[in-house]
Amino acid sequence: MEQLVRRWSRLRSPELNIDVREYDPRWPETFEAEKHRIHGALKDLGLVDIQHIGSTSIAPLPSKNIVDLAVAVPSLPCSVPQTEALLGLGYQAYGPSPIDPDFSWFWRIEAEGQGAFVVHVCGAQSPWFSHLIHFRDFMRAFPEERQRYEALKRELAQVPDQSWLEYSIVKRALALRITERANAWAARGP
């Protein structure tokens, strides 16, 4: 965990308010629309898969209005043409992703700060790509796990003068423990 904190303290990300809101049933269709845009830009550049990840992918989990997408490509690092395609869609490159230092992340913040999209460009064969999907599916399948995670998110969102990074590091500690259970669950077959 100490290594994770050191790595995360060097991450670049936009300055955002920690505004956890109730689950928005429009998030899946918002994801689908953005997935379509990204697919159009990357389909001839080695795109393997696009998955909705993060809290907005887990109904009815409250979340920040940030839709996370795992974009799987055959190999890393993200190629220049892939990067240029994402920049052409209005994304900004922020360097290594907090999920895995080999992944790249790109942010697109909507006008007036009404929401954001985060693309994590992942290696299709990376274990973390599967872990992200297992976490999502496990949280959908087990309401008690989702409720524990929700309680922590709500508690953290109330901490005054907390940075997005501080919020994310504490939340990530629980997410990693849940991911271990999710991977074991996926290995047994849901």
Image (cartoon, rainbow, N blue to C red):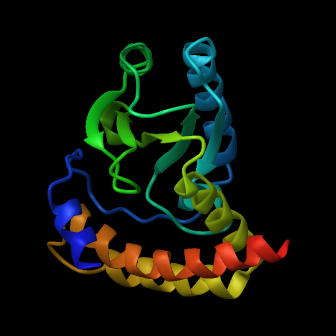
Question: Where's the C terminus, which quadrant?
Answer: bottom right
The front one of 156 and 111 is 156
Q: Residue 21 in the image: state x and y as whole percent.
A: 48, 64
Q: Is residue 179 left or right of residue 12?
A: right
> Does 159 sit above or below residue 96?
below
Find residue 156 and report its horizontal and vertical position in percent. Answer: 33, 79
Figure quadrant of residue 19: bottom left
Determine whether 159 is above or below 38 in the image.
Answer: below
Q: Where residue 60 sits: x, y (%)?
A: 67, 68
Residue at coordinates 15% horizontally, 55% vertically from top-left? 10
Question: Which quadrant of the figure has residue 166?
Answer: bottom left
* Above-or-below relation of 147 to 77: below
Q: Nearer the viewer, residue 5 or 19?
A: 5
For the point 26% across and 38% down, which residue is it? 94
135 shown above or below 91: below
Q: Residue 59 lies in what quarter of the image? A: bottom right
The image shows residue 36 at horizontal and vertical percentages of 65, 24
Which one is nearer the viewer's eye here, 107 or 77?
Answer: 77
> Which residue is rendered at x = 18% and y = 77% of the image?
160
Which quarter of the rendered picture does the N terminus lie within?
bottom left
Does residue 125 appear left or right of residue 67 in this picture?
right
8 relative to 100 in the view: left or right? left
Q: Residue at x 82, y 77 (%)?
A: 188
Count of all numbered marks drawn on residues in the image: 0
